[in-house]
Amino acid sequence: MALISDSDASRNNAANVHIEGEIPVSTLIIWLTVAGVCALSVFSVRGYMQGNTTTLYALSAFAALLATNAIIYGFSRSEPLLHGGFVALITLLFSYLTVFAVENGAGVLWLFAYPPVVFYISNQKVGLISCIGGWLALALLFSPIGGMIIKTPYSADFSLLMLSALGFVMVSCYALDQSRRRSKQRLLQLASEFEYAAKHDALTGLFNRREGHARLESEYERYRRNHRPFSLLLMDIDLFKKVNDTYGHLAGDEMIKLVARTLLRECRKVDIVARWGGEEFLVVLPETGAREAFLSADRIREAVATQSIEVDGKKIQATISIGVAAIEQSKTIERSLQHADEGLYQAKTLGRNRVCEYSDRLSGAEAEKKQAPRQKVQTGRATRKALVTSPRRD
Ligand SMILES: Nc1nc2c(ncn2[C@@H]2O[C@H](COP(=O)(O)OP(=O)(O)OP(=O)(O)O)[C@@H](O)[C@H]2O)c(=O)[nH]1
């Protein structure tokens, strides 16, 4: 099961990526709206029973506005609108509870709910500005200047305690939120690193065999829908063991990387390039028939043959052999891989540094169009109907 709902988490801002188990902000707002509407209804009825119609109307209005905000979200599905509307409404509501000293001044205690909610819902900048702004506004209200503008029943002792306790809660919420955001960021980074490591080969950065196979299956599914054939190139570095034995494994690794770089350079963006095994590579060419695949393979072979690595001032040339198989009609993936493998085996048998295409449908004339000899071959692995090979040009 994926840890992160967004498959390409690394490209996204951590705040916008939802981690499984985390309460989505919009869901939290809906819950808080339901709880808020219930609480406001209770207190507006209490206000009415105490003969305070202003409280009744004001709290009922806030309850209605909160409910409307949630209903608008139900229709628009606009999260920024829901989040912005909710923060604005609770800021107004808490200001009202404080300034009008609702419930004989006890309503101001609701201010302690503001910092955790606003930090969770908004980004850190908005949370910080809202909290600092709110605290300063409260300090102004409790100050002698505020007392001259609005008469409130709060004593000096209560005001001091309220400001210090609220400031403490705000700082704590900021620190906890900062820590939560950093952990989430790190978690996303780790998840993206793990995902990369699980899908890529460490030496070359190409897709590894598992990812190559997964992408091949996706391509096959696409083929089953649109029936446009695609092709596989299975390739292997020639006499690679000799490179390792003569120049060492580091030189061998350099050669593998050189071939990988050349493949990436020669292939299109849509092509899938994977390291299939030690010195074996698989290239999937979407929407490419047998003929174009053969030509692409030969171009790749030539490109690799012009490359070399340098060991102790000595240039060592790399060559590859390639087996080509097109996926057409009802051919399965496994069968096509087997055919590409047979083509590769044949390329090795015929002297390496060449391309061999498995084909069970090409006529001799068609094969000749490719200016390549068509041969009936029998190898140690299997009997095949025909293989088209590229001439070795060395
Ligand atoms: N340096 C290095 N060598 C590797 C790696 N993976 C596999 N090999 C080596 O690749 C060699 C493969 O050799 P073989 O399969 O015998 O084939 P070859 O010598 O290339 O001969 P042909 O395929 O017939 O041309 C083995 O010696 C493996 O040890 C790797 O990641 N790095």
Image (tube, helix red, strand yellow):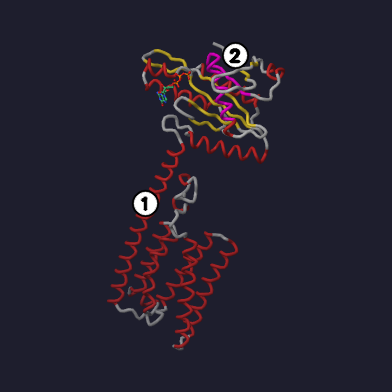
- Is residue 289 rendered magenta in the image? no
Direction from residue 127 to residue 272 in the image, left or right: right
Label 1 residue SS: helix
Q: Amino acid at mark 2?
A: Pro
How busy is the neighbourhood of tag 2: few (under 14 within 10 Å), some, or many (20 plus)?
Answer: some
x, y percent for residue 253: 41, 24
Q: Which residues are magenta?
A: 336-358
Q: Residue at x 40, y 12 (%)?
A: 314
Q: Residues within 10 Å of mark 1 (few under 14, many from 20)?
A: few
The quarter in which the C terminus is drawn is top right
Which SS does the magenta portion mostly show?
Answer: helix
The residue pinned by badge 1 equals: 183
Residue 33 sits above or below residue 385 on the image: below
Within the magenta stretch, is there residue 350? yes
In the shown orientation, is residue 318 left or right of residue 170?
right
Q: Nearer the viewer, residue 302 or 384?
A: 384
Q: How many marks?
A: 2
Q: Which residue is mark 2?
A: 391
Disc 2 secondary structure class: loop
Q: Amino acid at mark 1?
A: Ser
Front position in the image: 250 or 280: 280
Residue at image coords 38%, 82%? 104
